[in-house]
Amino acid sequence: MADKPCSISLSRWPWWRKWFGTRSERAAAKFLGRSGLRILARNVADPQGELDLIAFDSATGELVIVEVRSTASPDLHRPLDSVNFTKQKQLTEATLRYLARKRLLGNVNVRFDVLAISWPADAKTPTCHHVRDAFKAVGRHQFWN
């Protein structure tokens, strides 16, 4: 009897997704650190999800909320496209709650970035695509300049 290829998708396994996400967030933090951003917090818990990375850009004086998206394929468009209107609204609302908890609401400029990371099987290091100012605050909220 000939061997059949395994049709199990690892992306459906919760432990694998968590490991892959953690690995990607560590790589993102390194990449952003080398780009001049100072990482202030990782995986900030929120009732409706989490904020992946919070950084400070000393060149612009902005607080940067970074959404990290990763893929095992070389295509970076799909992870970037996954930050749709609904996700942008969730990130905006989670950021507002974070700023309120830290008593920073109205006192700091905020920028939303998206960092897509590709981990192709044949590559030793990931490919990163950083989209600065990927979107503005979404919904009925606004941030002050």
Image (spheres, rainbow, N blue to C red):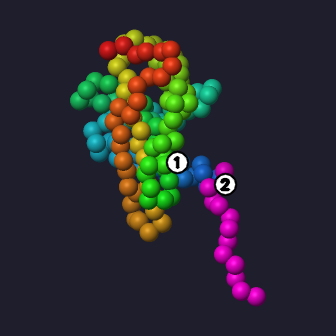
Say which element carries label 2. helix
Give me the C-alpha separation between circle 2 and circle 1.
16 Å
Q: Residue at x 62, y 28 (%)?
A: 48
Label 2 environment density (alpha carbons within 10 Å; few <14, some 14–19, many ≥20): few
Q: Is residue 92 above or below residue 142?
A: below
Say which element carries label 1. helix
Q: Is residue 75 above or below residue 99?
A: below
* Of callouts 2 and 1, the N-terminal one: 2
Label 1 environment density (alpha carbons within 10 Å; few <14, some 14–19, many ≥20): some
Q: Amino acid at mark 2?
A: Arg
Q: x, y percentage for residue 119?
A: 46, 58
Q: Is residue 55 magenta?
A: no
Tell me the tag on residue 12.
2
Q: Amino acid at mark 1?
A: Thr
Quadrant of image for the N terminus: bottom right
Q: Residue at x 35, y 43 (%)?
A: 130
Q: Work out whether residue 63 or residue 83 is closer to the camera in this orientation and state it.
A: 83
In the rendered structure, the answer to whether residue 98 lies left or right of residue 130 reads: right
In the rendered structure, the answer to whether residue 31 lies left or right of residue 18 reads: left
Q: Residue at x 42, y 35 (%)?
A: 66
Give, as a single range, the part of the protein colored magenta: 1-14
- Does residue 44 appear in the picture of this structure? no
| Magenta span dominant secondary structure | loop
Q: Nearer the viewer, mark 2 or mark 1?
A: 2
Outermost residue, right direction? 1
Residue pointed to by mark 1: 22
Tell me the tag on residue 128.
none
Q: Is residue 115 above or below residue 139?
A: below
Q: Residue at x 63, y 60 (%)?
A: 10
